[in-house]
Amino acid sequence: MSKNGTATKGASGNDVSTVALKPSASAGAPSDTWTDMLAEQTLLTLWNGDCSSEDRAKQLNAILDALEQIAPRDELEGMMVSQMIAAHNASMECFRRAMLPNQTMIGRDENLGHANKLLRAFSSLVETFNRHRGKNQQKVLVEHVHVHAGGQALVGNVTPNGGGAERN
């Protein structure tokens, strides 16, 4: 990205000059340099293909929107989000190529195999991202309990001797 917030042509030759970073685009860090670098890396993961510059601009803005909406909270989350977006885009490209009308069965199998690996990487990244954010920490333990007629049951954590609470 250039200093004025517009994208530049990356080392891979992908032209990302059709999009400007939104001031609120986030990569998880207060540093504009970090945000610009991570956004450019993410933008350069898109397959160019044969799309118009208008379609390309839509794709690039969609990536920036995804970065903004997921809202990474720190640099590590920013990197994970960038990798999740890249893995998603690559897997979708593999699915697209597998379904080409003139695709051979070998080509279809190879592309679906690559997509499968990318989806596993994506799932692993999402799980790591959620664990980093503290999501999915809830643990539910279900045990088999019998309560007969006239009996009483207590549901919850039970500790011997009242669990430390003083009784009179």
Image (spheres, helix red, strand yellow):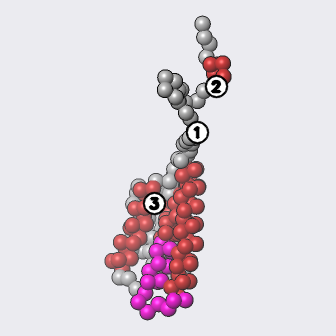
Q: Is residue 5 above or below residue 14?
A: above
Secondary structure at badge 3 equals helix
Q: Which mark is residue 143?
A: 1
Q: Circle 3 sits on which residue?
A: 67
Start-end of magenta stretch: 89-106
Asked if one can make out residue 8 in the rendered structure from this viewpoint, the answer is: no
Q: Position of residue 109 (x, y in %)?
A: 54, 83
Q: Amino acid at mark 3?
A: Leu
In the image, is residue 36 part of the stretch drawn in magenta?
A: no
First-in-chain label (3 vs 2): 3
Q: Is residue 124 left or right of residue 94?
A: right
Q: Nearer the viewer, residue 60 or 112?
A: 112
For marks 2 and 1, give the CA distance: 16 Å
- Within 10 Å of the Cα at label 3, are there few (<14), some (14-19), or many (20+) other Cα atoms? many
Tell me, yes or no, whether the two marked residues, 3 and 2, touch with CB atoms within 8 Å: no
Q: Amino acid at mark 2?
A: Thr
Mark 2 or 1: in front is 1
Q: Circle 2 sits on which residue?
A: 159
